[in-house]
């Protein structure tokens, strides 16, 4: 049971940090998730847990991965791609994939010039 409580607390802290970084109040997040402010507060304190569906909604709202929320994989680890990029690669649309690759290569070249 201690592991579950530790996980709840860790997830809650990450959600709270994301919410604060976005300049969002708990009532704003509660509205977006269609849950009570009390539930948001309890989740951020590790007293309660968001459902998997709500955790996925949180990922969409803050553009983070479920790995970040649940496992704490650092956002800057290179393993956390924006959902929109993943969707393009998963779509199989060759033209979209090539455009994204071109954009990423251009971005890499610009960074190297710094």
Image (cartoon, grey):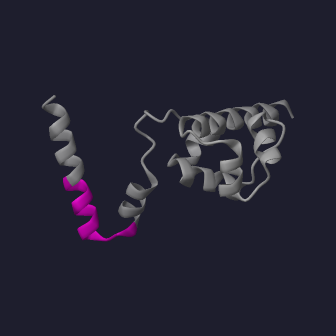
95 is within the stretch colored magenta:
yes
- Residue 73, position as x, y percentages in the image: 54, 35
Q: Quadrant of residue 8?
A: top right
Q: Quadrant of residue 85?
A: bottom left
Residue lying at the far left in this picture: please name it. Answer: 113
Tell me the quadrant of the picture where the N terminus can be found.
top right
Q: Is residue 5 left or right of residue 100?
A: right
Residue at 48% across / 36% down in the picture? 75
Residue lying at the far right in this picture: please name it. Answer: 1
Q: Is residue 6 above or below residue 82?
A: above
Q: Is residue 72 above or below residue 62?
A: above
Tell me the quadrant of the picture where the C terminus can be found.
top left
Q: Is residue 36 above or below residue 25?
A: below
- Residue 92, position as x, y percentages in the image: 35, 69
Magenta highlight range: 91-102
Residue at 28% across / 62% down in the picture? 97
90 is within the stretch colored magenta:
no
Front-lying residue, 22 or 95: 22
Q: Quadrant of residue 23?
A: top right
Residue at 22% across / 52% down in the picture? 103
The main secondary structure of the magenta stretch is helix
Q: Is residue 16 left or right of residue 102?
A: right
Q: Is residue 43 left or right of residue 61?
A: right
- Residue 4, position as x, y percentages in the image: 80, 37
Residue at 65% across / 56% down in the picture? 32
- Residue 21, position as x, y percentages in the image: 54, 35
Front-lying residue, 9 or 37: 37
Q: Is residue 62 left or right of residue 35?
A: left
């Amino acid at each position: 049971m201690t592991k579950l409580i530790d996980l709840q607390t860790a997830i809650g802290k990450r959600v709270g940090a994301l919410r604060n970084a976005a300049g969002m109040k708990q009532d704003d997040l509660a509205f977006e998730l269609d849950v009570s402010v009390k539930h948001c507060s309890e989740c951020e304190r590790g007293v309660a847990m968001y459902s998997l569906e709500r955790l996925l909604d949180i990922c969409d709202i803050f553009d983070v991965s479920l790995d970040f929320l649940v496992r704490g994989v650092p956002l800057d680890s290179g393993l956390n791609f924006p959902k929109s990029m993943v969707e393009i690669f998963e779509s199989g649309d060759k033209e979209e994939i090539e455009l994204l690759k071109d954009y990423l290569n251009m971005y890499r070249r610009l960074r190297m010039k710094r």
